[in-house]
């Protein structure tokens, strides 16, 4: 009985796909000589020529073409098996990998995950903090089962469902010239120094979002990712900052700050929960998707507007 090893099949499939042993080696992160040796050993095992070498690269022989189709099916089945096992923790508990941005983790997920685990007590949620722009890619590449990101529209390449909305606010000291207002446009504060981090996670990406509502770029004195530290710097008079509404509410009273609503359209953010393929989700991930997207049968009402 012939025993075919998986690394050799991977090299062989890559060689047929790429029509080149050198490109196959690069794809599989091995040197070309090792890739050639793997294919030669595979040909020795099956007792027939699988690849025909020529000046332009390689192509499969008739036997190689048959093995190529079978090998692709084998590798696909292996990855499905790996994905199935990856859905469990080392203790054998069903596991869901959830990637989310910082705003979501702070504002919404503690209560939502607690509610989900109360319904699904035998499930483990692995929470990964990532920036919104990276999250759909992580889901597409299989590094996360579900992702939560904010964007002006749903990201291509994933199935996205509305999750929540939040509102970005402006945090200023109590003696600030705008402190008596309930809400402002960001343009009204354009003469102030700002303490970043910004919606969209980078200053450049934020300007792409908000440039139509601003007459000139903001003056940014510091870039501080932590919300509490940012509010503390505002309290020390080092600048003003944009903070999600619920996060700001948790810090302004203790630090003597004022929260101003922002009237700019971009200040309301839509969050989406996304998956690569809803139909292929394992049961625990499908249950979490249903819960977070609001179709879970017992999801309690919580603060935050929904679209």
Image (cartoon, rainbow, N blue to C red):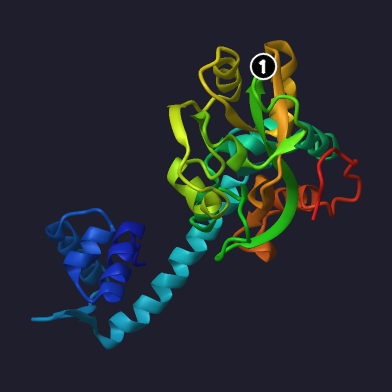
Q: Quadrant of residue 222?
A: top left
Residue 294 lies left or right of residue 42; in this view the side is right
Residue 227 lies left or right of residue 197; in this view the side is right
Q: Position of residue 223 (x, y in %)?
A: 45, 28
Assign the N terminus to one quadrant of the image: bottom left
List the single residue furthest toward the bottom: 62
Q: Position of residue 47 (x, y in %)?
A: 23, 75
Assign the C terminus to one quadrant of the image: bottom right
Q: Position of residue 229 (x, y in %)?
A: 56, 18
Q: Is residue 254 above or below residue 135?
A: above
Number of numbered tags placed on the structure image = 1
Q: Is residue 106 above or below residue 232?
A: below
In what element is the residue under mark 1? loop
Report the residue at 90% width, 41% height from top.
300
Q: Is residue 89 visible?
A: no
Residue named by callout 1: 175
User: Between 305 and 261, which is closer to the camera in this rendering?
Assistant: 261
User: Between 231 and 129, which is closer to the camera in this rendering?
Assistant: 231
């Amino acid at each position: 009985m012939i025993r075919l090893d998986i690394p050799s099949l991977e090299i062989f499939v890559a060689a047929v796909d790429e029509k080149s042993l050198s490109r196959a080696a690069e794809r599989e992160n091995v040197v070309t000589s090792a890739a050639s040796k793997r294919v030669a050993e595979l040909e020795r095992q099956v007792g027939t020529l699988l690849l025909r070498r020529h000046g332009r690269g390689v192509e499969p022989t008739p036997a190689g073409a048959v093995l190529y189709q079978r090998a692709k099916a084998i590798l696909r089945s292996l990855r499905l098996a790996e994905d199935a096992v990856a859905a469990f923790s080392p203790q054998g508990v069903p596991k869901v990998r959830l990637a989310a941005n910082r705003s979501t983790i702070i504002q919404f997920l503690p209560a939502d995950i607690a509610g989900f685990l109360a319904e699904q007590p035998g499930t483990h949620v692995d929470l990964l903090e990532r920036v919104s722009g990276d999250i759909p890619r992580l889901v597409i590449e299989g590094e996360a089962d579900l992702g939560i990101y904010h964007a002006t529209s749903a990201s291509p390449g994933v199935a996205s469902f509305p999750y929540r909305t939040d509102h970005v606010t402006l945090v200023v000291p109590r003696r600030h010239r705008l402190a008596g207002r309930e809400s402002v446009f960001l343009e009204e504060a354009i003469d102030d120094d700002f303490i970043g981090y910004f919606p969209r996670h980078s200053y450049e990406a934020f300007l792409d979002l908000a440039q139509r509502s601003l007459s000139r770029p903001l003056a940014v004195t510091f870039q501080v990712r932590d919300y509490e530290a940012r509010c503390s710097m505002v309290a020390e008079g080092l600048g003003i900052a944009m903070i999600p509404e619920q996060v700001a509410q948790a810090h302004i009273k203790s630090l003597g700050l004022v929260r101003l609503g922002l009237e700019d359209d971009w200040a309301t953010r839509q969050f989406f929960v996304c998956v690569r393929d809803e139909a292929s989700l394992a049961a625990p991930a499908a249950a979490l998707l249903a819960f977070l997207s609001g179709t879970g049968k017992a999801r309690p009402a919580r603060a935050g507007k929904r679209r």
